[in-house]
Image (cartoon, helix red, strand yellow):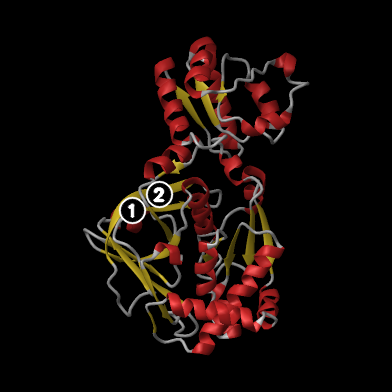
Amino acid sequence: MLELLKNKCNAEITIFGDETIETMCTSSLQHVGYVLIATGGVENLFKTIWSTGMLHTTTLIADGRNNSLAASLEILSYLWENGSNGRIIHGDNSTIMKEVEEACLILSDSSDISMSSLFLGTRIGLFGKPSDWLIASGVDYDYLREYYGIQTVNIDLQRLIDGMATVDESEAKKVAQNLVKRSKSVKEPTDSDILAAAKTYLAIKAICKEERLDAMTIRCFDIVKACNTTSCLALALLNDEGVVAGCEGDMQTLMTMLLAKKLCKEPAFMANPSVLTDKTTMLAHCTVPISMCDDIVTRSHFESGIGVAIQGEMPLTDYTVLKWGGRRLDKLFVVEAKAIKNEYSSHFCRTQITFDINLKPYLLNRSIGNHHVIIKGCHAAEIKRFMKENGINIS
């Protein structure tokens, strides 16, 4: 099996036994994708290695010989009891190799297939607390730090408000003028509305640069109340510029957007499921990355009727709809669908897109929260394999 792993998957093999435990280099454990349990009696050895905090994979390989499956089952129970989602790949050599090879093929452009390597060092800015209505969309920040290597940075909204007051007026006018040029039309917003939204964008962008943020989410309705403007334009532009940006302080959805960006290299549209039929599903929100749209219309924010929002006309092509959730991010839903229309209704948020898929059974019975994420292209197989490899339950 070791020869197969080396030859077919270009695997680097490190063998640990009791005699090496005292001298092992823990830094090498960061890049472990699998742990092959070769014999029984190694449960405490695994526990010792796991206790270093450097081993992030929870995928075990056991062919059953020499009590390897028995040991793996004991280790798996230990992982689950300590809050880690684990799994076992079991079977003969060909069965095991097939499953490992599939994961290696999907992630062949990455030097590491572990979840921790995907997010290690990521900095997320939390602009205010999550919105009051998001009662099931939080995450365990300590878990993010310890398991994924993600650092969260709290940003007081007053800092943003103060920054908006000191933004360079000429820079804000350039952003505003560029938005108008890119828009097919401008409806509700006035010139001053667009200028205020541009200042909001520049102030958020400045903080993201100061804090070295890879992603951010904002309690946006507080900005609406305090400043009579919106952050919808800011989020659209930041997503286009590579800073993953979400609204309402929804951390589970932001992590889904981060997953899409890091794994699939795609910007993401965060939206509410809004109209469900037996054949179609429509999702809507007031901000969308402009790069995902054929055309845009500059609108006001749907709920408040003020500020600036983006009504995007998205191409009618293939998309992936997904949500990664749970306080410890242990659940996943992902499906592929084709967009069939961009029809606009005044009863929903500004960007509206309808897919040829019935998501009622999932959404009405076992939905992972409200917001879901949309990315261009067919990525379901890639996402499923990666998440399965990292012990995430797929709905």
Q: Which mark is residue 332?
A: none
Position of 248 compared to 291: left or right? right
- Give x and y (percent) for residue 176: 53, 80
The answer to whether the residue labelled 1 contacts the one labelled 2, judged by CB atoms less than 8 Å apart, is yes
Q: Nearer the viewer, residue 17 or 64?
A: 17
Instruction: Using a 10 Å C-alpha cutoff, classify the residue at mark 2 as few (fewer than 14 neighbours), some (14 to 19) or many (20 or more).
Output: many
Location of residue 294 (image quadrant): bottom left
Which residue does the numbered mark 2 point to in the structure image? 333
Location of residue 385 (image quadrant): top left
- Residue appearing at x 65%, y 64% in the figure: 208
Q: Amino acid at mark 1?
A: Tyr
Q: Nearer the viewer, residue 184 or 130?
A: 184
Badge nearest the viewer, 1 or 2: 2
Instruction: Using a 10 Å C-alpha cutoff, classify the residue at mark 1 as few (fewer than 14 neighbours), some (14 to 19) or many (20 or more).
Output: few
- Residue appearing at x 35%, y 75% in the figure: 348
- Up-down relation of residue 4 to residue 297 (above or below): above
Position of 168 compared to 298: left or right? right
Q: Which mark is residue 362?
A: 1
